Image (cartoon, rainbow, N blue to C red):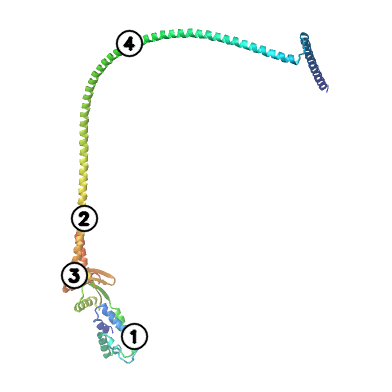
Amino acid sequence: MNTIFLIIASLFIVMVLIVLIFLIFTTRSKKREEFLIQEFIKDTLFLKISETFQKELEKLIKEETKKIILENKEKIQKATDEIIESYKKELEGISQEVDKKNSQFFELSLKAQNEILTNAQNKIANLNEETKKEILKFKEVNSETQKLLLGEAKNQVSKLTQNLTQEVSQVYQVAKEALREQITKTEQEIESYKKERFKEIDQGIYQMIGKVSKKTIGKAIDLSTHEKLVMEALKKAKKEIF
Amino acid sequence: MEKIFEEFAKKIKTKEELIFYLEEIIQIQQIVFKNKGVPLSKKMGGKMSGELKNFLERLEKKEVISKTPGQQSSFLEKLKKYLQSLPEIKLEIAFLPSDEFLTRINQWLEEEFGQKVILDLIINPQIVGGAVIEHRGNWRNFSLVKEIDKLISQKSL
């Protein structure tokens, strides 16, 4: 309890001190301001002005200011004209210099151009001669290589033709053999077909013969033969089934 | 009695004839009890075949058949059963046989079988010649058409 009371008391004291300091400060600043105002008032005279005077004063001020402005304008104009003149002169001098330099440069460049041209022409001439020489060399080399290539090509072609003829003959032989086999096979098939057809025809013929013979024999046999055949059949049946 | 029936059966060669006589016997059986006292041979009048009529007349003369309808009926029944019991042979031939040939076949069959045999005759020209014979379920083809077919099949192979 005592410590809490002490803390609260100390806080109160601090707050009071802060307020006192603030009050002191504000009063001092006010006093300073009042002092300055008084000082100002001391050094200056204050007059009361009338409205007409004020108007006259304003008019005068306006006229004076106009004059001043005009004068200043003239001065400024004059100054700017002088500045412009001086810059013009400088520029003229510079442009003359530039023209001079240009003409010098033009002469130099012409000269350089001519030199370059002559050099280039010389170099071109040299190059032409060299290229002519190179072309000649190349032609010689080309003709030699051509000869070599032709010779090689002829060799290759002859080899190729030899191989080709061999292969063609092989293929021909194979094809011939295959064809022969096919022919033999086909011939065999034709033969067997012929046999089959002849067999069919023979069968047809025999069947026809059978039909015709049944009709004709039946009519050709006389009664006594019929009776004989029946008796023979009965005798056979006696042995087998009676 | 059987010998009497055998004597009548000798006249019958084919099954067709057998059926004919059996039908006649059945017809007589239907009227046997009418006109009592009239002989059996006269009961049918002119509607009976000559063979059967002569047979019955002979038997009536010999007094084998009595005049009583009962005995007449019994006689007819026995005759019918005897005829129905006769063995048959089916004979298929290619031509129309003569009576003489049929008689010859019958005689030959009687000698072989020791009894009367009835021929079930079939005329079929398509067998060309020879015969197709059947007896008690046993069948044999001795026809010419078979031989021709055999020959043709041998040639075509």
Q: Looking at the image, which is closer to me, A179 or A26?
A: A26
Q: Nearer the viewer, mark 1 or mark 4?
A: 4
Asked if residue A118 can be seen in this view, the reply is yes
Disc 1 from disc 4: Cα separation: 166 Å
What's the mark number on residue A118? 4
Disc 1 with disc 4 on a shared chain: no
Q: Nearer the viewer, mark 2 or mark 4?
A: 4
Q: Earlier in the sequence, mark 3 or mark 2?
A: 2
**B56 above or below A92?**
below
> Toward which corner of the image does residue B16 lie, by quadrant?
bottom left
Local SS, label 4: helix
Instruction: Identify the chain of the residue marked 2, using the numbered disc in the image.
Output: A
From the viewer's perspective, tell me whether residue A4 is left or right of residue A240: right
What's the mark number on residue B30? 1
Q: Which residue is mark 3?
A: A218
Mark 2 surroundings within 10 Å by alpha-carbon count, few (fewer than 14), some (14 through 19), many (20 or more): few
Q: Looking at the image, which is closer to me, B16 or A59?
A: A59
Q: Looking at the image, which is closer to me, A120 or A71?
A: A71
Instruction: Identify the chain of the residue marked 4, using the numbered disc in the image.
Output: A
Q: Are marks 1 and 4 in contact (CB under 8 Å)?
A: no
Disc 2 from disc 1: Cα separation: 70 Å
Q: Which residue is mark 2?
A: A197
Q: Nearer the viewer, mark 3 or mark 2?
A: 2
Q: Amino acid at mark 2?
A: Arg
**A176 above or below B148?**
above
> Toward which corner of the image does residue B30 lie, by quadrant?
bottom left
Local SS, label 1: helix
Q: Amino acid at mark 4?
A: Thr
